[in-house]
Image (cartoon, grey):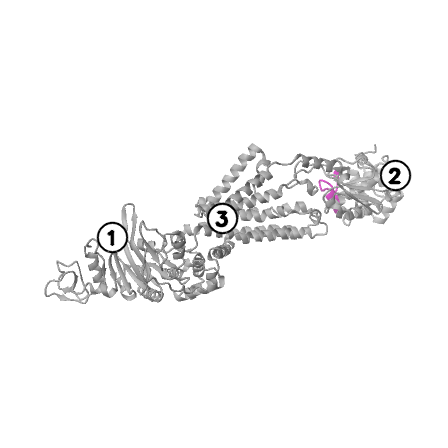
Amino acid sequence: MTTVGVAEPETPGRADHERERDPATASVFALAAFQARQLLLQIPVLVFGLLYLAYVGYGLFRRDEGMDAYPVLHDVDRSTQGGAELFAVALLVCAHRAALLDRRRGLEEQFGVLAMPPARRTLAHALSVVPCALGVALVVCLQFAWAALRPGAAGHGSVFELAVAPLAALLAGAVGVLLARVLPHPAAPLFLLLATGLVTSLLSDGLGTGGVDWLWPAVLENGGTPVPGELLGRPAGWHALYLLGFTVLAVCVAMWVAGSRARVLKAATAVALAAAVAGVAGQAPGDSAALQAARKAEADHPAKFQTCVERAGSRYCAYPDWTGWTVDWAGVVHRVRSEAGGDAATTRLTVRQRIEEITDLTTDATLPTSSAPGTVTVGTQWGGNRVPEFAVGVARVLVAGSEQASQEMCDARVVTTMWLALATDPTPAATFRHLRIDDSLTGSAAVLTPDGGSMSVSAHQTQVVRELLREPHDAVTARVKSHWQQLVSPHTTTADAARLLGVKVPKGPDDCPAG
Amino acid sequence: MNTTVSAAGLTVRYGGTPALDGVDLSLTDGVTGLLGPNGAGKTTLLKVLATAVPPDGGAFTVYGVDPATPAGRLAVRRMLGYLPQTPGFHPDFTAFEFVDYVAVLKELTGRGDRHREVRRVLDQVGLADVRGRRIKRLSGGMRQRVALAAALVGDPRFLVLDEPTVGLDPEQRMRFRELIAEAGEGRTVVLSTHQTEDVAMLCNRVIVLADGRVRFDGTPAGLTARAAGHVWSSTERAPGARAGWRTGTGTFRNVGDPPTGADLLEPTLEDGYLLVLDEKPTEGTEVTAA
């Protein structure tokens, strides 16, 4: 239509630099920043964010001298995925709520005439989760760095595993915003979570958990004994691609529903869909034949894959990720051997790190004992109780000659073994208790060994060991060394050992007579 | 004066019922009052001008920009301030947060400049002292001022206000009139109202709308002048009067065609409005310009 004398006054009030900037893009970031501040003030986000931080903080700052002191970084990386799930759910709920807020307050028409179109508002809502995701990334980096900087850290982390928790936060936000566009009801997140749980349960029944586990954001696979990084077989890269693709796809669909038909959106949707599908396909196949063969080979023939070093007359063989621990192993060997007498004090040992053949990362099986003379098994965990368990492993080989031979022990050699393992321990009585499966200090019990198995200690042997631990250390050591041959003989009974070592002889029938 | 907003043949139908029936407009800078009875189409016209509702027929431009295309609509929205009849709020936001949120949606992106602008409009509407207070804790009048601040933020050229003084007490209404008069300096303001006093005090122009059609388009003085010689006083209600009511003095004030020798009174804008509404429009020539 034609107008006459149309006025074209200057736009007042807006700075020139603001008009020069692309308002469409800049306004998305401005709204995202505004919504991010609002999101951070939402009670569920605050509460679950603080709970997440408390959970991580507890893990970092607890005074734990156990195996956490020697973290395996290719297990630590995926452990960072734990704890953020509830925070992600809170983000989903709050992002959904924020994206619905104008509608719930009847502001859609009022705000519908403002310059920023709904699709860009949708994008801004999705981006408002980014600071939270960056916060999660920061926490994850802190968790990992905390572990990696420990002197006993072994292995290498995966950036893809570390990316999962932040990506899960982004995905949760994107799904929340998408839900707000396709199902604008306050209870939609609850419906989604219930439906997801139901579908997962049904699929798990039909396909087994392995079929659907990787469709969840976090896949922890906890509980197994660490294995070399190359044997993990986790499709972490594909999974990260799946999460990223799914996140972008959710945002694109939400923007599409909000009315955008921009070409760049169509292109982004296609790329995101391709990435999500590729991610699903890539993570789906499970363990390859090559991986299974590698797991078997490294379990059955560890020497082919290990690096060995000589330390003080003994040989220490470790998988490449763990070579740094050989110094600690050598320290224990030296400590135990210093208490031994006869040839044992100078016997050349081979400390061999071993793993079991795993079928998945939750496997925690017992290794078969080694029959090789002078060979001591050590596992892939260190610190805490693993140290005295290894000491027991070293001692039983020094006493019996081999791990397999030590399984026959039910005589004075058990007492000798336990003395060697505990004699130089700073808290021998407590360690003795922790070594026993039932945490007892009386009666018979099984004592843990580094192959994941155990060694039986009778009630009389327990009593004698406890008596020895009450005696002056140097006096007992001297007696052990002077009676070494008798103490490592299968014909010496527990009572004989008590007499030889000058402690009270247990009364009653020996429940483990010499064979 | 230059035309800033121009419309021709604007038509909107709800179902088969015309809410706007070929409305032509030509607005200039200053405050234009939109008067009309309930159902006249005032709110629909404002929604069309605010690009909230697309017209079924006709077209309009704002500062030369046609909002029929997406790009044109965006350009119009970038120079628009809109206060709807029943403004909504986020009650948990503070006044500052709410206006800041609207400012972001208006694409004021630089945080520092935006916050200065938000403070400016809150100061302008007299809410500087309560800008940190949550909206749910503000009075109705204060909320209305928050809504006006939201409309004013970004200093829009074209301001559409739908019954902004409804529900306000006289003092608040006076305050609002000051604000709107100030806002009308240098920009185009369209103000829908039932209050003829608002129009008389604020507007340099008035449009009377009835049944979706423009019945009058001119100055308030022109509308008042329409009633000259049509308002008289009598001791009883005049039977031929189009409207009549007892005044505080006990006499009747009548509007219509006075009898010969009637005691004529000085007309008001309301008298003119009543007369215009009561006139039967003649097809094609119903608009009275003054």
Q: Quadrant of the N terminus of chain A?
A: bottom left
Q: CA distance from mark 1 to mark 3?
A: 46 Å
The answer to whether A461 appears left or right of A25 in the picture is right
Specify whether disc 3 shares its chain with disc 2.
yes
Residue for point 85% across, 42% down? A348
Using the image as rendered, state which of residue A233 and residue A91 is in the foreground. A233
Callouts 2 and 1 close, C-beta under 8 Å: no
Indicate the secondary structure of the residue bearing disc 3: helix
Point out the frontmost of discs 3 and 2: 3
Task: Give the class, few, some or many, for how many residues have Cα within 10 Å of label 3's Cα (few <14, many ≥20).
Answer: few
Find disc 1 in the rendering and name its residue: B211
Using the image as rendered, state which of residue A134 and residue A49 is in the foreground. A134
Q: Quadrant of the C terminus of chain A?
A: top right
Amino acid beneath label 3: Val
Q: Which residues are magenta?
A: A430-446
The answer to whether A65 appears left or right of B17 in the picture is right
In the depicted structure, whether residue A440 falls above or below residue A126: above
Task: Give the class, few, some or many, for how many residues have Cα within 10 Å of label 1's Cα (few <14, many ≥20).
Answer: some
- Residue A444 lies in the magenta-colored region: yes
The answer to whether A102 appears left or right of A389 in the picture is left
Q: How many marks?
A: 3
Callouts 3 and 2 close, C-beta under 8 Å: no
The residue lying furthest to the left in this view is B260
Point out the frontmost of discs 1 and 3: 3
Indicate the secondary structure of the residue bearing disc 2: helix
**x, y (%) of residue A376?**
79, 40
Q: Chain of mark 1?
A: B
Which label is found at residue A126? Answer: none
Find disc 3 in the rendering and name its residue: A264
Find disc 2 in the rendering and name its residue: A486
Task: Give the class, few, some or many, for how many residues have Cα within 10 Å of label 2's Cα (few <14, many ≥20).
Answer: some
Amino acid beneath label 2: Gln
